Structures are given as C-alpha cells and as structure tokens.
Image (spheres, coloured by chain):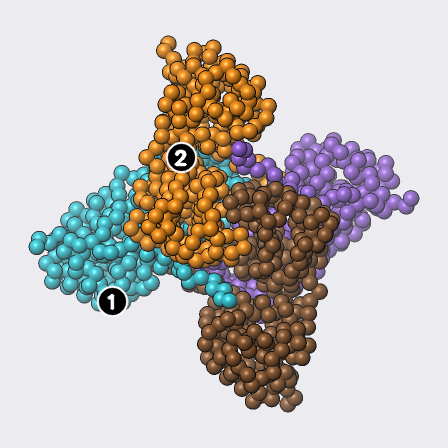
Chain colours: A brown, B purple, C cyan, D orange
Amino acid sequence: MALRFRHAALVGKFQAEGIREVLERIAAFLVAKGLEVSLDTLTAQNTGIAQYPVLGVDELGRACDLAVVLGGDGTMLGIARQLARHGTPLVGINQGRLGFITDIPVQQFEDALGPMVDGLFEEEQRTMLEGEVHRDGAVIFDGHAMNDVVVSRGATANMVELKIDIGDEFVANLRADGLIIGSPTGSTAYALSAGGPILHPSMSGWVLVPIAPHDLSNRPIVLPDDSAISIEVVAGRNASVNFDMQSLTSLLHGDRISVRRSPHRVRFLHPRGWSYYATLRRKLHWHVGIGSDA
Amino acid sequence: MALRFRHAALVGKFQAEGIREVLERIAAFLVAKGLEVSLDTLTAQNTGIAQYPVLGVDELGRACDLAVVLGGDGTMLGIARQLARHGTPLVGINQGRLGFITDIPVQQFEDALGPMVDGLFEEEQRTMLEGEVHRDGAVIFDGHAMNDVVVSRGATANMVELKIDIGDEFVANLRADGLIIGSPTGSTAYALSAGGPILHPSMSGWVLVPIAPHDLSNRPIVLPDDSAISIEVVAGRNASVNFDMQSLTSLLHGDRISVRRSPHRVRFLHPRGWSYYATLRRKLHWHVGIGSDA
Amino acid sequence: MALRFRHAALVGKFQAEGIREVLERIAAFLVAKGLEVSLDTLTAQNTGIAQYPVLGVDELGRACDLAVVLGGDGTMLGIARQLARHGTPLVGINQGRLGFITDIPVQQFEDALGPMVDGLFEEEQRTMLEGEVHRDGAVIFDGHAMNDVVVSRGATANMVELKIDIGDEFVANLRADGLIIGSPTGSTAYALSAGGPILHPSMSGWVLVPIAPHDLSNRPIVLPDDSAISIEVVAGRNASVNFDMQSLTSLLHGDRISVRRSPHRVRFLHPRGWSYYATLRRKLHWHVGIGSDA
Amino acid sequence: MALRFRHAALVGKFQAEGIREVLERIAAFLVAKGLEVSLDTLTAQNTGIAQYPVLGVDELGRACDLAVVLGGDGTMLGIARQLARHGTPLVGINQGRLGFITDIPVQQFEDALGPMVDGLFEEEQRTMLEGEVHRDGAVIFDGHAMNDVVVSRGATANMVELKIDIGDEFVANLRADGLIIGSPTGSTAYALSAGGPILHPSMSGWVLVPIAPHDLSNRPIVLPDDSAISIEVVAGRNASVNFDMQSLTSLLHGDRISVRRSPHRVRFLHPRGWSYYATLRRKLHWHVGIGSDA
C-alpha cells in the first residue's frame, strides 16, 4: 500500500516544558512509518531536539505534506493560520484536556496516527477570516483569524459605537462593549461566551455577535461569508481590534475594519470515525445535566 | 416596454373584515396595468367580490405568474407555502404594522406595485421545510413549514426528551420544553424569542433552538440544510409537533419526526431598494435604545 | 449532652424500588441515637416495613420534630410542602446524584446524620408560594409551591398573553410561551433553564421569568415577596397553571392566578460546614469549563 | 399649608450648552413657590447665572433640603452619589428622552414640581455601593457607585480570572470578560446589557453578572446586600475596576476589590402617581413588539 504522506512537519506548543520526550517519540514513530520529519525553528529551539532538519514555518509549508502538532487548540490554530496558504493538512495531538480540534490524546498517538499517515482519516476544511484596518485612506494593520475578529471598547470607556455594513448594505449602528465576527471555528470560542450560536464547520457563514449590546434586541446574526464586512468606529475611546490574538489598540473615530473570507482554507485531519457532534457533546458537557432527580 | 407579469392572483387575509374595498382597488389597479386578475376561493367568499374569476389555490398556481397578497406575514406565509410547488412569486401589501415580508403599506400600494408589475423589483428566495412523523414504520402526519417545525412538551408535562440526529450522525439527547427547527425565515419568529440567532435569508441552513433546555450548555446550532434532521421522542407525556401552525398532538415515545429541505423555494418580490437589514432595523426597533442620557 | 431531636419522621421516595434496606438502616441508626421513629403511610406501603408506627403526613408533622427524607430534590420538596405548616425541619439523604437540597450521600449517612441529630447542623429557611385561580368571582383551584408557579400556553396554541399586576400596580402585558414565578429555591430549577438568574435562598423575593417572550426586552424581574402577584389570562387557548407539579389546564380568558408568600417557611438542615455556593458549584459544574488550552 | 421644603439646590448637566434659560425659569419658579435657591459651583460657572448663591456640593448638602437636577440619569446619579451622605432628596427634570430616574419632562416642570415642593410626592430610596481596592495590605483606591462596580479584562487580554467571595464564603472562580456588581438602580443599566435581571429598587440585594463568561453555566446571581463582596484578580493582564465611571486601571494579580453597601441611601422624589413599572415599560419599549400580524 502506497503511503499517503511522505514528509511531516512537527510542531510543539510554544515555550511548553517537558515536551521533548513526547516529540521525539512522535518523530521516531513517523520515521518508522516511512516519513521524513522536519521540525519548526521555534520547536527545535525550545526543545533542543537536533537530529531532524529545522525549517521556518513557510519552508515547512513548502516542503511538507502533513503537519503534526503537539499542543492545544491555541497552538493548532496559530500554526494552521500560518500554513493556510500552503494547504498543508494538520493533525493535532493533545497532552491535556482534548480540544475542539486537537482530539488525539498523546497516550494513544500511535494507534490514531498510524492509520492516518496510511491515508485513513476524516478531513474537514475550515474557513479563515482576513482583513485590515483603514485610517485616512491607508491600511494601518492587517491580519488573519481562524476564530474571530473582535472590535472592543477601551478599558475605561463606557461603550463603543460601531457602524456595520455588509457588502454595500448598511446593517446597523451598534452600541456595545464590542462586536465579534466569528467563523464556524470561532463560534465555539469567545462568540459562544458572548451568547452566539454554534455554527457547523461546513456552514459558509460568519456569525456577528454583539458583546453586551445597549439595545436588547441586538441579537447575533449569521451571514453568508461571500460578502465583505465593514466595521467603522463611530464613537468610544481607545477601542481596539483583535484578529485572533493579534491586536491593534487605540483605534480612532473613522477607523474602518474590513473583513472578508480568506482565499485559503485550513485542512484538519481526524481519525476515522471522528464526529463533530461528539466533540461538541464532550466539550460542552452535554448530558452532564443540572440533575434534579425525583 | 413589455410587461413582466400578465396574470395576478389576488389573495386577502383569511376572514378579515373590511378588506373588500381595498382588494377591489388593488384589482382595478392591476387590470389598469394590463394584467388579468383572479381571486382565490376563500377571498371571494369572504369579501363577496364577484367580477373576477375565482380559482382554488392550485389553479391559481397553474394559471398565474404573480400573487398579490393583502394581509400580514401570517397570511403571506400561509399562501406562499401552498404556492411553493408552482414557483409563483408573491408580493405582500400590509394594512397594519409592516411585517418582515409584507412590506408595502396599503396607502402606497400603487406607487410600489406599479414599477414591480413592470418588472422592476428585488427578488429573494426562501427555503422551506418539509417532513413527516413516523410511528411503528408508518407515516402518520406530514407537513410543510416556511417558519419552523417545533416539537414541544405536553401542557402539564415537566419536560420532553428528544434524540436528535443529523444525516446519519447522532447529535445529542435534549431535555427541554421543546426544540425549534427554524428556517432563515423563521429565525426572526419564534426561534428568536427562544434565544436563537438571526439567519440571513440567503444562508443555506437551519437553526436548531432548544426551548428552556435543562442543560445550560445546550445552545442554538446552525446547520447546513442539505442533511435530513431526525427528532425522536424519547421521554415526556403528550408531546406535540407543529409545522408552522399545523399540529399533531399526543406524540408517543418512539415517534420520530423527520425534517428536510423542500425541493421548492418561495419567491418574494420587493420594491426596488428593498433591504433585508432595513427590515430588521424596523422590526427589531434597533436604535430605539434604552437610552441613558448623561 | 441533651439530644436536640427526639422523634424522627422517615419518608422514602414515592414508589421507589429497593429502598427498604436503606430505610431500615437509617431507622435503626436513629433508634440507636435515641430517637423515636415513625414512617409515613405511603413509605410503609411501598416498602412493607412494619416495625415502626405508621402515620399520615399531618400526623407526622404534629408528632415529629425532625423529618429524614430518602430521595432526590423532588421527593424532598414534595414532603416539605406538606410539612411546612408544622415547621418540621427536614434532612435529605440521596441515593443518586446529590441535589440542591438533598446533599447527604447515602454511603455516608451515619457520619452526617449523627452530629445533626445531636444538634450540630446548619439551618436554612426557604420561602414558599401559595395562591389560587379565580374565575367569575370564585376560587376554582388552589395550591402551594416550593419551586414555582408557572402559567403556560396550550400545546397547540401560538402564545399566551398575560396581564401582570404586583400589589395594586400594573406591571406589563406579556406575550410569551408562559411566565414562571420562581422562589429562590425554584430559581435553580425551571426558571434557570428559561434564562432567569439565581436567587440566594436568603433573598426575600421572587423572580418572574418570561418563557420565550415575544418582546425581546421582556427580561426576568426580581421582586420583593411581600406583595401579591396577579396574573390574568388575556389571550391564548388552553393555557394551564402549575403549582410545582399540581396542574390546572384549560384556563379561560379572564381567569386570574393570584400568588403570594405562604405564611409558612420550610426549614432544611444540612451538615456543619454546608455551603450554598459549594452546592451551586457542584450542581452547575462551574470550573468544568469549555477548556480551550493553548 | 406649610411648605415641605425651604431651600433647593439647583444643579445642571455638566458642560451642557443652552441650559441657562431653563435653569433660570426653574429657579424663578422655586423662588415664587417660597424656596431659597442655591446653585452648585460648576453649574454657575457653566451657565453664568449669577443672581443666586453659589455653593460647593457638600455645602449644598448641608444647606439644602431638596436638590433639583436638570439633566439625564447620568447627571442625576453623579450628584446623588455626592449628596448621599447628607440625605438630600433629589428631583430630576429631563430635557431629552426621559430616564429611569429623571422623569419630569422640562415642558411640564411647573405642573410636576409645584405639588412636589408642597409635599405631594412619591419617595423611593436607593442603595449605593462603596468599596476599595487592596494591594499588598494597603488601600490604593476607593469609590462609591449608584449603578455598579465593574471589574474588566484589559483591552488586549484574553480574559480575566476573578475569585469571588461573599462574606467569608467562597463563591467561585470566574473566567470572563469581567464581572458586574450591580445595585437595583444599576440593574437596568450595564448589567441588563450583559444579561442580568431587573431588580426592583426595593430589593435589598445586588446582582452579580458575569460578562461573556467562559463557563456557560456561570449565570447572574442575586445576593443579599448585607454581606461584603470580595473580588480578587487571579489572572489576566491589565484588568481594571470601575465604580460607576471612576476607574482604576492596571490591576495586578492579587489585587482585591472589596465592595459593600454604603451606610447612605439616596432619596429620589417623583410626582404623585409615579410608577416604577410604568418607567420600565417606557424605557424598555415593552409592547412595541416584533409584531407578526396574521
């Protein structure tokens, strides 16, 4: 049987301690399965592992046809964002509590990873947001986000007022703590805490979730992802914008954040039998219940 | 200039009083614009208007290339559901407070309708739900819904427990007052009251909204509309199911409600310049505000 | 040291199977601690335990200075409601998942109960609702509730409209699936599922929680419990009212539900060191978390 | 008939333009009713009104037995906070959209104010929060709040983690955007936007409302106001605390915010017939409705 993959990029959680031994076991396993293995620069520096080639993220993207990530959802989303332009599929191995995306427990990585590198896996694709901040006709910031783009009030400000447009249609002026533009991936993150719905990953849409809106009828809206979203800061001091965790603070009135779907999609691989709904049940503790027995 | 439409079906709100004079004015206006006009049977009976041909709804669907409806959203959705198989586009004229769909005020119907019958309009298409109830291998009920399919607990029952599957995937067992499967059209109706998000009409999806769920982490989910949804009654006395307003009560344990996207879409026509977001702002009173001036 | 209690009523979960052996152990333990023990009629019938006096609930209330209940919160609240007029303090022993009130696991009942019957315990008092339904000047139903009084729409009805008055002040007309009048005890039950806040048991107040309200700004209100609440059915078919689980269906327009604080309070005893907040943390799974590791 | 009041403090909205003429009319009206009138320093400076004695706020509190405020709820709450220690009752006259507290429209001030200065009014008392921030054993900030004390994450921080204690009981560790401790007065302000319930002003309680909490079961809690609340910053960068609008930023881990009920209550006077619920209906637009006619 021909191997499905031939060269794996191996990436560990940033600055994590005690992951050298596990990464070496994963690397040895992949080599034994017949794959080349390369490490990303930060992982090599952090762990001191020296017996594999070390490449920058873009070099990994060009050279590798698989990325194996050791860490949680945050690590996975960070590297996925960087590899998106290369189309490299990612697999996540988790040392702690399983995530929404990193769903292979480290204790069972051989059993899970073996069939996957042989080509037996479930693949799902996730959309990504991209955008920039415009001020006085110039672009002063740009970024990508797997989870969400968030515009928020300044720390001591009462509120921010945002003018929202979709494509060339005016939607509303929103007075709130802020606004989350969430992808399906981000719909189970911050957007969920702020009262948004869950979006199935196959939905071609974003969810706009107002944070503590002044008008009680300002509710989350699910929109198609083929129109550009424009958010203009109308009022409020020291507002900021975050693309996932990259931030621009001190937004001025008139600054405009423009967001759209990235042309790149991220490919996540899961073991055969993986189920999105099973992940939801596990992560959201459905059936744990308040439990009022008779 | 060639007329876009040639034969209009005219439908008035069911059992409404005092609509004869307005309907006659609308009919005369359409005739003056060069259209044939036919009335539906119930409207003719209700109003006593006799100078136009009277047809049943299916006959109207076969004969007419436009339906002009006088009433609110309820009237419009009811007739739209029946005309869906014929693809007849609908226009709504409203005597009272404007609806989400019936957005032409009767006072201005000539100005609005004139350009529309000449072919100047915005068209939007809405998806529709269809489904049936299965008991012991037989179908005991079927229906269509523009807004939503709702499964609810019985009046004096504590709660209903529902097993939810999407396609061939198990989603969750839900203990709640009930579950709403809402279309984008229905997302601004009951589903919104129960805490669901707004779905833009162009989204190819449904929203599943639990009603007063026992587990606090049971949140609304937005799903693609290309998979069948199956809801099985697992526990709870006297549960019922509603397709829009058609009801089946006294569901038994093991009864299974199967719901999918109808092959038919409903076509709504609006005056040029119509905006879905403007309708949202008007209906949800955005910007009315709680208003805490300094 | 003088014993604090001298005669315990022993009550088991209604129609529960396999509780005889545990009840006998509890009874023997209480006797060994020097207490008289009496069984309630239903418990004796259900279990066949014959070596203790058997009394009706009211007789138990007059004779006993302690009630020991084996079951969940539902059992506890049911018997508490009946004993309220006698002021009998209650202790709850739970065979399954611990409740909000029944917080002694059966495996440790000796360790927990021993110090308690010696007078070492935490006592908390809970308010209770009482009320009746008025029709055409007559009272057609009355009831008591530890958790809540709920007015709901009929199974196939669209909505119910309720006129709410507090004391002699008009509050609002509510269009919704229903309205919950919850006590602090009930605030962690149905009212919580419907979006209400948690009320600390020492609060002298009720919470009014609308169920799926049509107006998005109809929010839960916390009210002092010293005013009568009046709910009049203005519109909606087949509405019903529930006092805890006792129901009156087929309410008519004009029917008025009147609710007030019962003159009786229920006394719950807990082991020393009991904490209401610890119970909340356990029952609501605080800190379980969605868990997005980096 | 003896006048109820003899000396009114007159206060205008801070830095408002065009209020001189109205203030002069109010002053003249009060003088005509037999009252002495004094202006607060900032109002005199802002308007240039010179014919009345000018006093600082504390002097006004000592000298006056009534404060008449021209402005919105923000102005009213600001001056109320400062006058609280003197027990001076306040009346609010509003030039714009009526507030929750400032409910006399300027167009009708004579009709409303006349009977009030004669002693015909409704009085309600509102509780106030006070507290301070502790760092390394020292108090580094203190403040008072009519609405709320809010602890929030820093602008670019992911989240803040707060340890909450009530009296000497541990409540929970909260991971969220922040936490609002709201008074009944504040329950219709920011706390409402964040999902909190409305607290009737006569409730002796606070509401704790988590802002976008990570755990979906972290819900608003209503607590008695006779226990001290302690909030310790456990994690999160650049958290801040606000007492109404007074802010302390750059909180450090280990900083502890201590909040309790102020010994002072604020007295608000309203015209006869005033109703709290009527104010709610007006401010929250109850009955405006989404409005789905048939």
Depth check: B44 or A216 in front? A216
Please, which residue is most extreme toward the left here?
A: C1
Disc 1: which chain?
Answer: C
Q: Residue at x 69, y 37 (%)?
A: B94
Residue D104 point in image, percent of width and height: 50, 24
Using the rendered image, report if marks 1 and 2 lie on a common chain: no
Q: Quadrant of the N terminus of chain D?
A: top left
Disc 2: which chain?
Answer: D
Residue B23 point in image, percent of width and height: 75, 35
Q: Residue at x 72, y 45 (%)?
A: B275
Per the image, label 1 sits on a secondary structure element best described as: helix
In this view of the protein, can residue A35 be seen by the observer? Answer: yes
Q: Quadrant of residue D19?
A: top right
Residue position for label 2: D201
Residue C47 vs residue D263: left or right?
left
Q: Residue at x 51, y 78 (%)?
A: A47
Under mark 1, the amino acid is Gln
Determine the CA span between mark 1 and mark 2: 46 Å
In this view of the protein, can residue B207 be seen by the observer? Answer: no
Residue position for label 1: C107
Residue C84 point in image, percent of width and height: 25, 45
